[in-house]
Image (cartoon, rainbow, N blue to C red):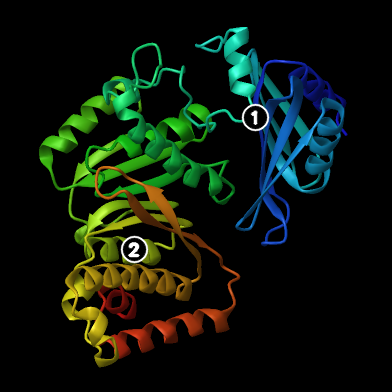
Amino acid sequence: MNEQFKALLQDIVDGGLYQIVLSNPRKKGDSFAHKVKIRPVMIKENLLFQETVYQGTKVFHNNYEAGPMIDRIEAWMKQEFRQCEAEHKTNRAVVLVSKKGKMTVNRKQTEHPAARTEEEQKMQMSHNRAKHYILEEGRPVPFLIDLGVQTKDGKIVHSRYDKFRQINRFLEFIEDILPTLPKEETVRILDFGCGKSYLTFAMYYYLHDLKGYDVEITGLDLKEDVIAQCNLLGRKYGYEKLTFLKGDIADYEMRDRVDMVVTLHACDTATDFALAKAVKWNVKVILSVPCCQHEVNRQICNKELASVLRYGIIKERMSALITDALRAGLLEAEGYETNILEFIDMEHTPKNLLIRAVKRPDMDAEKRQCRREEANRLAEHLQIEPTLLRLLQD
């Protein structure tokens, strides 16, 4: 193992470590870990390091002393992962392993804007401490300050803590799909129905400022005043490759390659038009939080379900769930590995669903055909004509 890497690990576990993240797995599949996070914890006055392993839909936790933890990290990087990011109170390091096994260690001295007192560090390392967020309290972020989520010294405004949690939850979804995005060329992202764009700004800040990606993001919305304000803020923050345009999802055409399409709360069938565009452009990643799923609610008719559908609120909720399940199945039919995940959004409903789809060119053709047939049978059985089904058939 690279001696420079060993020295780095020894330095950062000696004190002042915030977090280590191992990513970009060499092997894919639910039987292999796709991410590992490591953080210091205090248990019974002893400094240990908690390893959190993400494998498929499962999460495993183990605690180690410094020496065994270093051995574990070296083993992970030798056998399982190609990227290691370490954040320390005095420096930040990124370790990359090429396909030929060559390791490079990039280490940069940093002055953390919120140098923590000894007491604060103990609180941070408490085993029962609050969840670690990608955007941490104590690190001022311009758009969070303007949004009223943070004070100028980086503290979270108590009444805006739900918004802070929501933004971080969204960035966790982005973090999970990072290995899918190109690192050596511009990452192009289109955000349909961007609205006030706080999540769009969060995406740009995370990918460009924190992760070092060359990212180009276009936000699209119908409200001229919102677009003008977002462009003004983008220039204020120095986000040169963040642009907002007025336009309709159904009519928009992208000239260049698109790597990711994001659609958050595009109302009713606007979500379907955005998903169909993403499939047409063969994008690598789709993140969609649907909203106001009225179409199926107006159409659904099935005598076996009559005793359920006669109750308006039950019919509405069933229709929304059926709509999103159909969307997920249709995306799988187009060669996307698709999950439906829970998303925090206190402005609309206490809990929302997020559809995450990642393009898998090697997806089994038989599985894709099966998903397509399932969607057609369900639509026929419920006497519905979902917009996404029609658009993909066209």
From the top left corner, tell me how far across and down residue 334 is, in percent: 45, 73
Disc on res. 66: none
User: At x 43% / y 87%, what residue is drawn?
Assistant: 373
From the viewer's perspective, tell me whether residue 152 is left or right of residue 196.
right
**Amino acid type at mark 1:** His
From the viewer's perspective, tell me whether residue 332 is left or right of residue 31.
left
Kind of element beneath mark 1: loop
From the top left corner, tell me how far across and down residue 221 is, in percent: 20, 46
In front of the other: 45 or 245: 45
In the rendered image, which residue does mark 1 sit on? Answer: 127
Q: Nearer the viewer, mark 1 or mark 2?
A: 1
The quadrant in which the C terminus is found is bottom left
The answer to whether residue 384 of the structure is visible from this angle is no
Marks 1 & 2, CB-CB < 8 Å contact: no
User: At x 24% / y 85%, what residue is drawn?
Assistant: 307
In this rendering, is residue 139 above or below 65? above
**Amino acid type at mark 2:** Leu
The quadrant in which the N terminus is found is top right
Where on the picture, by quarter, is residue 195? top left
User: At x 51% / y 62%, what residue is drawn?
Assistant: 359
**Circle 1 crowding by C-alpha within 10 Å: few under 14, some 14–19, many from 20:** some
From the top left corner, tell me how far across and down residue 88 is, in percent: 65, 19
In the rendered image, which residue does mark 2 sit on? Answer: 275
Where on the picture, by quarter, is residue 346? top left
Q: How many marks?
A: 2
